[in-house]
Image (tube, rainbow, N blue to C red):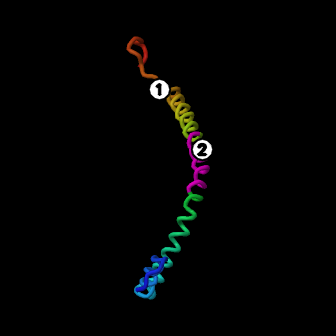
Amino acid sequence: MVYSLWGFFDFYKGIEMGMMTGGLGLVFTIFAFALAVLWFFLPFAIFGTKDKLAEIIAESKKTNAELARIAAELAATRTAMAPRLPDADRPGEV
């Protein structure tokens, strides 16, 4: 093996002549390319979901407030419609 100033490329030539020329090299190259593309788009995906997550949180807070209002109204309705139990202080009622 002849060494040059670009030692890495000499090493790469050795790999290229060996196991990277067949189907395994093709699979590795496709995998590396797909990984590079996904790695490139990762920040856009993260920052793109940030606004949507804020919208979801705001809607969730609105929904929780509405559910609390409905629960309070239901509790008030149940209290108003509940049959009154006879008090021990009033002997005439059953």
The structure residue drawn at horizontal position 54% and vertical position 39%, both measured from the top left corner, is 64
Circle 1 SS class? loop
Mark 1 nearby-residue class (10 Å; few <14, some 14–19, many ≥20): few
* Residue depth check, mark 1 versus mark 2: number of the one nearer the observer: 2
**Front position in the image: 48 or 81:** 48
Q: Is residue 22 above or below residue 57?
A: below
Q: Is 65 positioned to the left or the right of 3 in the image?
A: right
Circle 2 SS class? helix
**Front position in the image: 9 or 78:** 9
Which region is colored magenta? 46-61
Q: Measured from the top left, where is residue 30 in percent x and y?
A: 50, 78
- For label 2, the residue is 59
Q: State yes or no: residue 54 in magenta.
A: yes
Which quadrant of the rendered structure holds the C terminus?
top left
- For label 1, the residue is 83
Q: Count the marks: how many?
A: 2
Q: Is residue 68 above or below residue 3?
A: above
Q: Is 18 positioned to the left or the right of 61 in the image?
A: left
Q: Is residue 86 above or below residue 15?
A: above
Tag 1: amino acid: Pro
